Structures are given as C-alpha cells and as structure tokens.
Amino acid sequence: MKKIILLCAAGMSTSMLVKKMQEAAAAESFECEIAAYPTAEAKDKASDADVILLGPQVRFAKAKVQSACPGIPVEAIDMKLYGRMDGKGVLEAAKKLIA
C-alpha cells in the first residue's frame, strides 16, 4: 500500500483533489492512502510517505519539506492539473515519482 501525501498552505485546498485522486485510484484498483495536510505538518505527517506532492501555491517550500522528510520524493503538482482538479493526472504523476 503506497502512501501519497499532499501538502498545501492549510491542507484545505487540496482536500477536493485528494477525493478525486482516491476515486481515480479506486477505478484502477491502485491500493494507496492519500491525505492532505498543511506544510507545517510535513515532518509529523509525511515522514513515512512514498511521495509528497506540494500544492502549486507552496512550491517554494520544496527544499524545506525535503530536509524535513529526507529520502522521500517531493515535487510540486503541475498547475494545470491542480487547476482542473485532475485527480487521475495527479495520481499518475505521483506513481511516476514512486517508481
């Protein structure tokens, strides 16, 4: 079971995207846990994740998150995918980072 963590300013704006990603994962029988949290909780909530995705509005925090969660791939979500709330597209991007 893979663990995908999304981080944003308050953990709110990514909640809808998490739901869309969960629907996409269920549709393709991809077993994973997906959750969203504020970037301030990265060390506590994401230190055991397989991949960490940052909301475009907090992409500036990438280095800070990487140092808080060493060894875990960290990448900003593509702004177009985020804007469209494209759960399938973001899930595919996460899977590529895990592989």
Image: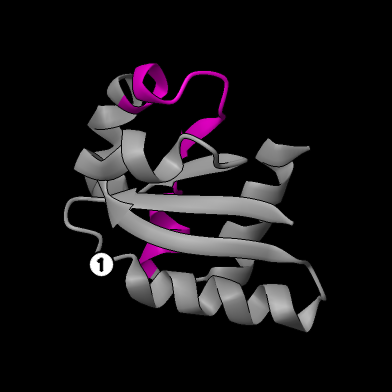
x and y percentages locating residue 72 in the rendered image: 56, 28
At 48% from the left and 32% from the top, the residue drawn is: 74
Residue 36: quadrant of the picture: bottom left
- Residue denoted by label 1: 13
Q: Is residue 61 above or below residue 86?
A: above
Q: Amino acid at mark 1?
A: Ser
The image's colour scheme reads one colour
At 30% from the left and 36% from the top, the residue drawn is: 59
Q: Is residue 73 left or right of residue 58?
A: right
x and y percentages locating residue 19 in the rendered image: 48, 78
At 60% from the left and 63% from the top, the residue drawn is: 33
x and y percentages locating residue 63 in the rendered image: 33, 19
Q: Secondary structure at mark 1?
A: loop
At 56% from the left and 52% from the top, the residue drawn is: 4
Q: Which residues are magenta?
A: 65-83
x and y percentages locating residue 9 in the rendered image: 18, 51
Q: Is residue 86 left or right of residue 83?
A: right
**Label 1: few (<14), some or many (≥20) within 10 Å?**
some
Nearer-the-camera pick, 38 or 53? 38
Quadrant (top left, top right, bottom left, bottom right) of the C terminus: top right
Q: Is residue 81 left or right of residue 51?
A: left
Q: In the image, is residue 15 part of the stretch drawn in magenta?
A: no
